Image (spheres, rainbow, N blue to C red):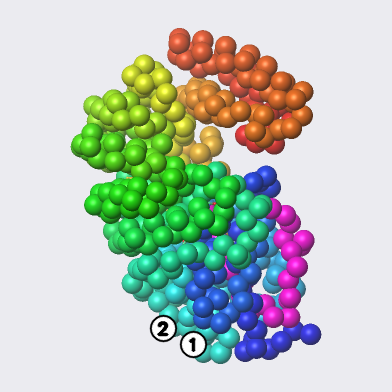
Amino acid sequence: MAKPLRERKTVLLVQPAIRKVMKPRIPINLLPLGYTLRKAGFKPQIIDVRLKDFDEFEIDWSDVLMLGISTYTGPMIHSTLEISKKVRKRDKKIVITLGGVHPTLDAEQTAKHKLVDFVVKKDGEETIVELAKAIQKGKPVDKIKGIAFEKKGKVVSTPDRKRFDLNKIKILPYEMIDMDKYNMAEFPINTSRGCPFNCIFCYNQAFNSWTYSLKSAENVVDEIEYIVRNFRKVNTIAFSDDNFFMDKKRVEKICRELIRRRIGIKWMSTIRADYLVNYSDKFLKLMKDSGCYTVAFGAESGNDRILKIIGKGTTVEMNLGAVKKLKSSGIIGRISFVWGIPSETYHESIDSLNMIKKFREINPESIINGFFIATVYPNTRLFEKVREIVPDFKMPKTLGEWANWELYTEGFQPWLDPKYVDQMMTASEIIRFQFFQRMNPANYFKNPLVVLGIKVAEAVMNVFATLRLRYHFYKYGYEWKLFNKLRFKFIGIT
Ligand code: B12
Ligand code: SF4
């Protein structure tokens, strides 16, 4: 029999799924919540439905106080609502709370959904504990900072709380998850939050609002040391920060400390092109010596007018300079582009594709991560920009509608000419194909026939890719549509 709320302690922390993932990355969004909840005397249980179906998890339902789900914008919301529905049906008393990027960016709409009791905005560590305590004790929630909820048909949104100090969690409670089920390559750690820039498409300003939290260099290296000593399969760390290099001195200290303690780990991070061009060779050498093997940056466009609209504060020249700097440092650049920014023309997108060629000429080892179609997230500047071109451009009106907002896919860009979209989607597929081609199928598939089949198919597609890129011919991309269909059918990834 279910216990009264005041006696319940279990908080289910759910990672929803777009699809099953063979070896997903560890849910570093949920682990810090697990840490603070456990410290406060609750029983957090992480349910990662990327690994298996929600119903397959063993849960002591009599003790469940709260269901907490983390979601991005887009199809993850389908999974979020499906799980919420099941839980609501099972026990109406369980309080359903949504947190993470999407609920923060659109707290009002999220809170209005009938399956949602509370939205936790921004950092969740302290808010979820206060909320769970109030619910358990039947106390009012109005004074809890950083939440939104519906009251008498109106959404109440309480003020933001002070940023969570990342130094309060030295090591994440990895024991809460089965580490063997997760991908140990490019092991993610989050060492800072926030970014001082204001790129048109980024979630950052709506989410972090020019506020920051940085873990100290000592604590970062302690954490890395712990990971390396405890999880033997980890040999690369990925700094999963908004802007890891925001405080260069901190990065310098991290590098020195990694070297001093002889941690012997390789690491990667995102970076900005303007940072790279301004860094001295000495600093880049320090990065490399401490284990940095890759830095990823968004060159975004090969055209200065578009770069200006994006508002990143970078130029074509800086992007070229960054690639040259990386070549001499021996650190591999992983570079991404975006296309379809409002008012961008076909020829301006071709500038970006030419830029990709140039990057490869400067350094053939440069990895082009993708040429992604611009997608509007709720509450970003891109939304306003689109409105200048399509005045009646509307965003989804309910949480359910947001679930169908397929990020980075065609069909959600009414400001673009469909013919241009069709051609650039082909270019986009080619660039992404070349990125995936770098991965050895033998690492993923045991059957040598499957591996051979993939290699042959890739070799054929490579011929099409090379020719199309050379002549900038992106019309009638039927072979890519077919290839993707087959890939999805037989391999399961797109
Ligand atoms: C690393 C990363 C990834 C990694 C994986 C992350 C992981 N561990 O699983 C990879 C590369 C796999 C990835 C994939 C994708 N990502 Co991503 N990713 C990031 C990145 C750079 C860091 C995420 C992170 O680790 N943050 C650190 C953690 C601690 O912060 P957090 O998640 O915000 O969680 C805190 C709060 O939000 C809150 N919270 C979160 N969940 C919950 C739940 C509850 C109940 C509560 C109370 C609170 C709460 O508390 C947490 C602690 O304070 C972010 C940008 C960013 N800095 O957030 C983009 C970002 C989140 N990704 C994004 C996108 C779009 C994607 C993809 C959909 C891209 C794609 N089309 O494939 C996929 C989705 C894949 C999938 N099926 O899960 C967008 C989301 C935009 C949006 N509006 O939703 C972001 C914001 C990047 C961007 N600017 O475009 N991503
Ligand atoms: S620099 Fe990166 S993280 Fe910062 S606002 Fe721009 S895209 Fe977002």
The residue lying toward the viewer, choosing from 71 and 50, is 50
**Residue 386 percent location from the top left of the image:** 38, 42
- Left or right: 441 in relation to 390: right
Query: Spatial distance from mark 2 to mark 1, Cα to Cα?
Result: 7 Å
The reply to whether residue 24 is in sight is no
The residue depicted at 47 percent of the width and 64 percent of the height is 171
Q: Residue 52: within the magenta?
A: yes
Q: Residue 213: which quarter of the image?
A: bottom left
The residue depicted at 45 percent of the width and 62 percent of the height is 104
Which secondary structure, mark 2?
loop
The magenta stretch is 51-72
Label for residue 140? 1
The residue wearing badge 2 is 143
**Residue 156 percent location from the top left of the image:** 44, 75
Query: Contact (CB < 8 A) between labels 2 and 1?
Result: yes
The residue depicted at 28 percent of the width and 53 percent of the height is 253
